[in-house]
Amino acid sequence: VGSGPPIWGTWESWQKVRDAGHAIESHTVTHLHPEQPNWPGIDGEYRLSIEQIEKNMPGHKVGFLAYPGGKNSHLNNRQLAATMYR
């Protein structure tokens, strides 16, 4: 949200999507880019995404993760994700 092309949206635009009845869930923080200087690790990818969504959409509880694909998809950790998501 807010860090990429306009199609990524703003919290306000995603709130409108939620208000229209859609679920807002996680797709991680960086889409698995460990080359970024402050990469939070896989735990941070999952946990920080939940924290950011729930902070910016009060009353919403994140329950699901859409695993990122691409060249770093091997970093996804199903066991760890299962401790954070339904």
Image (cartoon, helix red, strand yellow):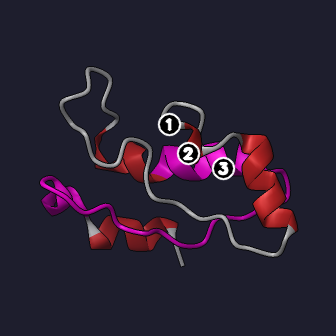
Disc 3/disc 1 C-alpha distance (Å): 19 Å
Q: SS for tag 2?
A: helix
Occupied quadrant, residue 67: bottom left
Which amino acid does the dot numbered 2 rest on?
Trp
Disc 3/disc 2 C-alpha distance (Å): 14 Å
Q: Quadrant of the N terminus?
A: top right
Q: Residue at x 73, y 42 (%)?
A: 11
Percent coordinates x, y for residue 22 in the rendering: 74, 73
Q: Is residue 70 left or right of residue 64?
A: left
How many neighbours does mark 3 have within 10 angstroms: few (below 14), some (14-19), or many (20 or more)?
A: some
Which amino acid does the dot numbered 3 rest on?
Ile
Q: Residue furthest top?
A: 37
Q: Is residue 10 above or below residue 53?
A: above
Q: Which residue is mark 2?
A: 8
Q: SS for tag 1?
A: loop
Q: Is residue 35 above or below residue 15?
A: above
Q: Residue at x 44, y 44 (%)?
A: 29
Occupied quadrant, residue 8: top right
How many neighbours does mark 1 have within 10 angstroms: few (below 14), some (14-19), or many (20 or more)?
A: few
Q: SS for tag 3?
A: helix
Q: Quadrant of the C terminus?
A: bottom right
Q: Is residue 68 above or below residue 34?
A: below
Q: Are marks 3 and 1 in contact (CB under 8 Å)?
A: no
Occupied quadrant, residue 16: bottom right
Percent coordinates x, y for residue 14 in the rendering: 73, 53
Disc 2/disc 1 C-alpha distance (Å): 6 Å
Q: Which residue is mark 3?
A: 53
The residue segment tinted magenta is: 47-76
Q: Is residue 58 left or right of residue 36?
A: right
Q: Tell me, for residue 5, which label it has, or none.
A: 1
Q: Is residue 74 left or right of residue 60?
A: left
Asked whether residue 48 is drawn in magenta, I would say yes
